[in-house]
Amino acid sequence: MTVPQPPVPVAASATGSAGPYRPEGFRPGALARAAAGAVPPSGLVVLAILSVQVGAGLAKNLFTQLPPSAVVFLRIATGAVILGLVARPRLRGLTRRDLAVGAAFGVTLGVMNLSFYEALARLPMGICVTIEFLGPLGVALAASRRRRDLLWVVLAATGIVLLAPWGGGDLSWSGIAFSALAGACWAGYILLSAAAGGRFPGTTGLSFAMIVALVVIAPLGIASGGAGLLSPELILLGAGVGLLSSVIPYSLELEALRRMPKRVFGILMSLEPAAAALVGLVVLGELLDLREWAAIGCVVVASAGATRTT
C-alpha cells in the first residue's frame, strides 16, 4: 500500500477495521462511490460507527452458538479474503525487516480482535469499547506537549475509576483486563500501521497483516468452534460480522477522509463509545446505570478534546 494518510490519533475503528490505515489505492466501486457521494462526510462517519457497533452486537449474539475465538476467526477470514482479492500481497522486493513489521502488524491485529471479543463476552458493549478506546487516546496524548491536555488525562482517568468495580460491582475484572489488552493492541496497531504503510506498496500491507492475523487466530478459532464452523447459517452470520465490522466501515471511513479534515474526522469518531452503549441498549438490551454513562461521557469528551488539540 502507498504511504497511508497520517494516523488520526483517536479515529481508528474499534475492532480491527482499517482504523488509521487509509491507503489511497482502495476503490470500493463506482456504484458505492456514487452512493457515498450523496451522503455528507459526517453522515458517512456516523454510518461507519453504527456499522462497526451493529457488527459487534451481531457478534455478541453469535456467542450463544460459537465461542468468541471462533467468531473472531470468521470475521478475520472474511476480511482476509476480501482484502486479498482487492490487493493481493506482493512480497517481491521486501526485506526481512519489512516482513517483520508486517507480521507484527498482523499479530497485533489478531490479538486486538480476539481480546476485544473476549471482553465483549464479559462486559456490556458500551463499557467494553470505552475501556478499549483508552489505547488510541493514549497515542494521541503521548504526541501532545501542551499542559492543557492534562485535563483530558484526568477526564479519562475519572472515567476508568467510575467503571472499575471497586465495591464488588457487576462488572467482570477479567472483562476489564481483556478490554485493556485490546486497547493496548489498538495503540500498537496505530503505530504499526504507519510503519507498514511506509514499507508495503499499495494496500498490500493491510492485506498481508490480515492474512497473518488469520494464521494466528485460525488454530484457536477452529479448535474452539469445532463442528459449528461447518454450519452454513453460522458461516453466513460470521461473514456478516466481518462485512459490518471491517469492510463496510473501512470503505465509508476512507470516503469520509477524502472529503473532510482529519481532525474533524477524529472528533466524530470519538463518539464511538457512546454509540456502542446505544447499540448495546437497542440491539442487546444492555442497560447501563448513571455512573457508567458518566464514565463513557468522560472518555468521549477526553477523546474529542485530545483529537482537537493534538
Image (spheres, rainbow, N blue to C red):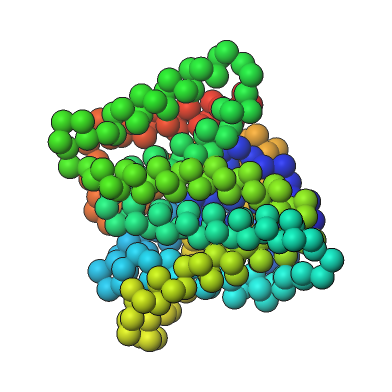
Where's residue 304, x and y in %?
A: 53, 30
Relative to 53, is 66 on the left or the right? left
Q: On the image, which quarter does residue 248 sit in? A: bottom right
Q: Tell me what residue is drawn at x 59 percent, y 67 percent.
A: 212
Question: Eyeballing the image, is 48 above or below 90?
Answer: above
Relative to 307, is 89 on the left or the right? right
Question: Eyeballing the image, is 274 above or below 152?
Answer: below
Where's residue 140, x and y in %?
A: 58, 32
Where's residue 154, x and y in %?
A: 43, 20
Query: Which residue ends up furthest to the right in the rendered image?
Result: 93
Q: On the image, which quarter does residue 80 sit in? A: bottom right
Query: Which residue ends up furthest to the left in the rendered image?
Result: 168
Question: Eyeballing the image, is 100 above or below 302?
Answer: below
Q: Tell me what residue is drawn at x 40 percent, y 53 percent.
A: 116
Q: Quadrant of the C terminus?
A: top right
Q: Tell me what residue is drawn at x 52 percent, y 46 percent.
A: 186
Question: Eyeballing the image, is 200 above or below 224?
Answer: above
**Residue 1 appears in the picture as rendered:** no
Where's residue 240, x and y in %?
A: 46, 71
Taking depth in this image into account, of 229 and 256 the one nearest to the observer is 229
Q: Tell me what residue is drawn at x 67 percent, y 76 percent.
A: 85
Taking depth in this image into account, of 206 and 282 the one nearest to the observer is 206
Q: Quadrant of the N terminus?
A: bottom right
Relative to 85, is 187 on the left or the right? left
Total numbered labels placed on residues in the image = 0
Query: Which residue ends up furthest to the top in the rendered image?
Result: 147
**Residue 2 appears in the picture as rendered:** yes
